[in-house]
Image: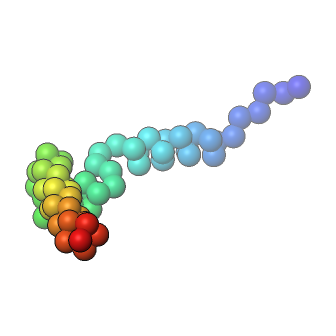
Amino acid sequence: MSDVQFEEEDILISEASKINQGAKGLIKLTMRFGAKDENQASYILIGVMVLCLIATMYVISTYILN
């Protein structure tokens, strides 16, 4: 049998490696809205998470536990 290789595989692999470089997901979105770098975006997301946790605890204590 002959050894056949397709160029599409190489192209897909190179495109996937380009996509995996740099910021991803919510960090990239946060940077688009004004964060200067990945570190600052991470701190902003941690702050949002803490605010959501506090709001969740308030709602649970006010409406569910009473």
Q: Is residue 59 above or below residue 27?
A: below
Number of numbered tags placed on the structure image:
0
Please, which residue is most extreme toward the front here? 66
Name the residue: 62% across, 41% down.
Answer: 9
Residue 17 at x, y = what percent? 44, 41
Name the residue: 56% across, 46% down.
Answer: 12
Name the residue: 28% across, 69% down.
Answer: 64
Task: Please say whether residue 41 is visible from this viewpoint.
Answer: no
Image-based side of 23 in relation to 38, left or right: right
In terms of depth relative to the viewer, which is nearer, 53 or 37? 53
Please, which residue is most extreme toward the bottom here? 63
- Which quarter of the rendered picture does the C terminus lie within? bottom left
Residue 42 at x, y = what percent? 18, 49
Image-based side of 17 in relation to 42, left or right: right
Residue 21 at x, y = what percent? 34, 43
Task: Please say whether residue 3 is visible from this viewpoint.
Answer: yes
Image-based side of 23 in relation to 43, left or right: right
Please, which residue is most extreme toward the right here? 1
Residue 7 at x, y = what percent? 64, 42
Q: Is residue 47 above or below residue 6?
A: below
Q: Is residue 17 above or below residue 25?
A: above
In terms of depth relative to the viewer, which is nearer, 63 or 24? 63
- Which quarter of the rendered picture does the N terminus lie within? top right
Query: In which image quadrant can residue 5 be found?
Result: top right
In terms of depth relative to the viewer, which is nearer, 29 or 53? 53
Name the residue: 77% across, 33% down.
Answer: 4
